[in-house]
Structures are given as structure tokens and as C-alpha cells.
Image: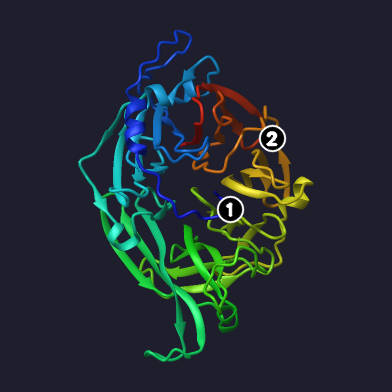
């Protein structure tokens, strides 16, 4: 699903989530801790329930929180599906957490409450108190908005959407022979004030490509994963590109890809969209359900590609908000494999990042440590499994020098792993108890 967009809605997810969250666990071997609040932040794990196919994550989302000490303790067992809390979402929730771990943010994805923003107080174990604040952004950004929280002190969330992609002709009116000019959709960029819980601004516009690209049928199909630049005066938004046959209007599943493109808009006005193009990457950079671009310690922005005809790359956007095409970081070359696909990744500081990826057309996931300065990468030594699939993974948590990753094959138990970003040392943490068809999709 991560490689092709399926416009299918799965119903009954919330009912399933509510049913499972009320189940009792009679397995005496499973320890379900009730952590006491400490000065350390809460560690919230999220699990996705199966909808119709094992691992599809379309049955809803459950969350459960523990202390840092318990998250790092392999003698602790966590069963989010038996003891967790069902957050609002018909399919997989789009979760974000506050920097201190005490608040969880969610925008429901599809369904009757799609586009509804919720804020939860994290209180340990399966206790999440929904605060009496809400706002629904569906009338602006649809019931299936893509959004992320900016790294601005938990002040702002940015939701984006592209809708109503249509052919436009050089002439107007009923003339059937009017020449084709382009396909474009209407893009929405919306700012959400996370403190006051209100829409602080939004803009809608069409975003043109070059005339030659549009005449060939290329268009922006999706926007996602905005990031704020160092000067805090521009947002860089990732794109997922599409090509339609100009003669028939049908979407082409295979086509010669353009250089990777991002959209730059003024911030906080959200005006003046501008498309920038990489000549290094040839894939999309919208990510899937997680952050996909990060402001580095050096002031530049680093961005991963997906569906790249030459395997995933890490691209660099300089402080002039343009691609640095002299920076070439091929993950195929660095890892010594082919067709790398980045499912999720996270910048950990000082040029070090961690990526969850597949390669050679397989869905099996792996974890890599990336050195963005040296442009090198190495696979992290973990107990890998053929059913380990990070395709819907959302949250890699960075807390100080520690990087937290949930590693669970679909339908199988796994663990939290804590990686030291300075040394690369790996610590096996709490056991994550799974259920058939389900998998854990993040730590927040």
C-alpha cells in the first residue's frame, strides 16, 4: 500500500479498537506496569490493528505509555491491544507527541470524524485523558489530512492536502477541441495552533510545474511532511508526483520520473508557493505517515526519497531553500544493496540519523544508522524477521542521545530497542506483546 495509493475506506475500525481495548488479559506471564510519574518523560507506544489484511493497520490505533526506565527494561511486558487506549481514527491515527511526552496530539484519518483534532493528556499505562478542546479541519483539508507538528516548541501543526486534480485547457467554454494544457489540483496548507487549538491560517492555490512537465501530464498528487527552515520564514513541503496520460486522463503506473520536487511557501503567511527540483533524487519525498524532512544541526534540511528509480537518497536543502545538488548520498551505495526504500527515518542530532528501510523489492524491514556528514550508512544489529514490516511506521522517538524504536514483526511479539546516537550501542528494552495481524507502529 505504501507504494501505491488505494482510495479505499475501511469501516468498523473504531468498533474493533473499542472492543479490543476492553478485553481482559488472563495471561499471568504478562506484566502490565502502572508506572508512577517521574521527572522523565512518558514513552508512548502505538499499535495498529488489522483491518482486512494482516499488517494493513486499518482497524484503528491503540496507545500505551510507560516510564523511560520501564521502556528500557526487558523484564517489562507491554500489551497495547489488551491494556491500551483507542485514539480516535477510523483507520490508522496520525499521532504526534509533545516534546516532554506529556501530551499526545491526533488528527483522525477518514470516517465520520476524519479531520478532527484531539489532544490527550498522557497519564501512564492506558490512561489518556482527552482534553475538552477540539477543532475539525476537514472542510479545509479533507477528512484525510496529512499533518506534522513543527519543531517549534509544540506551538504549531501544519496540515496539507491536494484535491480535485483536473485537466485544464488553454481556452475556456464548451469547445471540445480546446488543447490540453495541464493537470492540477487545489493544494491546501493549513496552520493549527496547538496551544489554543484553533486554525491560525490557511491558504489554497494551484501549484504549477514547468509548462513542459505539465504538457507531459505530470502533476503533484500529494503533499506531506512539512518542515520549518532555520530562519523560520519558510516551510518546505514534500511532494508525491503523479503522471496522467494527456490523451485519456488515465493515471500511468509507470513513467519516467522527474527530479525530486518540494514546495517552498512563506511562513507564517503560507503564501507564494514555489517548486524546487533536485537533480540528485528521482523519487517522491512526501514520506508516508511520519516526518520525512529534518532541520539539521548545521542549519540545512535533509530529506529522504521514496519510489526513487535509483533507490532512496538523502537530499540536502541549503539555507537558501534550494536543493544542494553537490550533496550526493545514495543509500543503495552506502548500504551495498539495491532498491532501498525509506519507510520512516529520524534525525538524531550532530549529523546522525536512523532509517527504517526495505531493499531489493522485499517488504522486510531493517534499521540503519546514517552519517549525513560522511554520507555513510550501516545496518543496525537487531534480531530481524521476514515478517518485520515498517510500511506504516510513524514514530521514532529521540530523547537526548537515546533513539527509541518499536520492532515487532506482524502478528509476533517484539521489543523496544534503545540506540545511543553517539556510540551506536543498542539496548534491548521492554517486550511488546502482539496479536495476530497487528503490529506496533511507533514510539512517541
For marks 1 and 2, give the CA distance.
Answer: 24 Å
Name the residue at 57% across, 82% down. 215
Q: Nearer the viewer, residue 39 or 214?
A: 214
Residue sitting at x 67%, y 63%? 281
Q: Quadrant of the C terminus?
A: top left
Residue occupying the far top of the picture: 28
Determine whether label 1 and label 2 are within 8 Å by CB.
no
Q: Quadrant of residue 161?
A: bottom left
Element on which disc 1 rests: loop
For residue 354, the mark is none
| Res 382 visible | yes
Q: Is residue 66 visible?
A: no
Quarter of the rendering containing residue 121: top left
User: Against 342, is 399 above or below?
Assistant: above
Are there few (<14), some (14-19), or many (20+) residues within 10 Å of tag 1? few
Q: How many marks?
A: 2
List x then y, in percent, for residue 142.
Answer: 34, 59
On the image, the x and y values in percent for residue 394 come to: 49, 43
**Dot 2 lies on which element?**
loop
Percent of width and height locating residue 228: 46, 59
Q: Which callout, 1 or 2, points to the residue nearer the camera?
A: 1
Q: Which residue is mark 1?
A: 3
Instruction: Tell me which corner region of the image, top left, top right, bottom left or bottom right, holds residue 158.
Output: bottom left
Q: Nearer the viewer, residue 81 or 280?
A: 81
Residue 84: x, y in percent? 37, 26
Q: Earlier in the sequence, mark 1 or mark 2?
A: 1
Residue under pointer 2: 380
Q: Does residue 11 appear to the left or right of 419 in the view shown?
A: left
Amino acid at each position: 500500500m505504501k507504494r501505491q495509493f488505494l482510495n479505499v475506506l475501511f469501516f468498523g475500525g473504531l468498533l474493533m479498537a473499542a472492543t479490543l481495548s476492553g478485553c481482559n488479559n488472563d495471561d499471568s506471564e504478562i506484566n502490565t506496569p502502572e508506572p508512577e510519574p517521574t521527572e522523565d518523560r512518558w514513552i508512548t507506544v502505538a499499535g495498529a490493528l488489522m483491518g482486512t489484511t494482516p499488517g494493513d493497520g486499518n482497524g484503528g490505533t491503540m496507545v500505551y505509555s510507560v516510564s523511560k526506565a520501564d521502556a528500557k527494561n526487558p523484564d517489562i511486558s507491554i500489551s497495547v491491544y489488551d491494556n491500551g487506549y483507542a485514539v480516535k481514527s477510523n483507520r490508522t491515527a496520525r499521532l504526534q507527541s509533545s516534546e516532554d511526552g506529556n501530551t499526545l496530539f491526533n488528527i483522525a484519518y477518514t470516517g465520520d470524524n476524519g479531520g478532527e483534532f484531539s489532544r490527550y493528556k498522557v497519564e501512564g499505562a492506558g490512561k489518556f485523558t482527552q482534553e475538552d478542546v477540539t477543532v475539525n479541519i476537514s472542510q479545509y483539508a479533507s477528512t484525510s489530512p496529512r499533518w506534522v507538528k513543527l519543531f517549534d516548541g509544540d506551538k504549531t501543526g501544519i496540515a496539507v492536502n491536494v484535491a480535485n486534480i483536473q485537466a485544464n485547457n488553454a481556452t475556456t467554454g464548451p469547445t471540445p477541441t480546446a488543447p490540453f494544457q495541464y493537470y492540477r489540483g487545489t493544494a491546501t496548507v493549513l496552520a493549527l495552533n496547538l496551544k489554543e487549538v484553533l486554525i491560525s491560517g490557511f491558504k489554497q492555490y494551484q501549484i504549477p510545474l514547468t509548462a513542459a512537465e505539465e504538457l507531459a501530464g505530470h502533476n503533484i498528487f500529494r503533499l506531506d511532511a512539512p518542515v520549518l527552515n532555520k530562519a523560520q520564514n519558510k516551510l518546505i513541503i514534500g511532494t508525491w508526483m503523479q503522471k496522467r496520460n494527456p490523451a485519456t486522463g488515465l493515471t500511468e503506473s509507470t513513467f519516467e520520473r522527474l527530479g525530486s520536487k518540494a514546495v517552498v511557501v512563506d511562513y507564517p503567511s503560507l503564501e507564494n508557493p514555489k517548486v524546487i527540483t533536485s537533480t540528485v533524487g528521482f523519487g517522491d519525498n512526501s514520506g508516508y505517515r511520519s516526518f520525512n524532512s529534518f532541520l539539521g544541526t548545521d542549519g540545512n534540511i535533509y530529506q529522504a526519497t521514496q519510489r526513487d528509480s535509483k533507490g532512496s537518497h538523502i537530499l540536502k536543502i541549503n539555507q537558501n531553500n534550494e536543493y544542494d545538488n553537490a550533496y550526493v548520498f545514495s543509500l543503495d551505495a552506502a548500504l551495498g544493496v539495491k532498491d532501498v526504500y525509506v519507510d520512516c527515518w529520524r534525525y538524531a542530532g550532530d549529523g546522525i540519523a536512523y532509517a527504517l528501510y526495505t531493499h531489493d523489492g522485499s517488504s522486510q524491514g531493517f534499521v540503519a544508522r546514517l552519517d549525513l556528514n560522511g554520507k555513510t550508512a550501516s545496518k543496525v544489529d537487531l534480531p530481524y524477521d521476514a515478517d518485520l514490516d515498517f510500511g506504516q511506521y510513524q514514530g521514532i522517538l529521540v530523547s537526548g542521545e537515546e533513539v527509541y524504536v518499536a520492532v515487532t514483526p506482524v502478528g509476533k511479539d517484539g521489543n523496544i530497542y534503545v540506540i545511543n546516537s553517539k556510540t551506536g550501542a543498542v539496548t534491548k528494552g521492554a517486550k511488546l506483546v502482539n496479536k495476530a495481524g497487528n503490529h506496533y507502529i511507533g514510539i512517541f
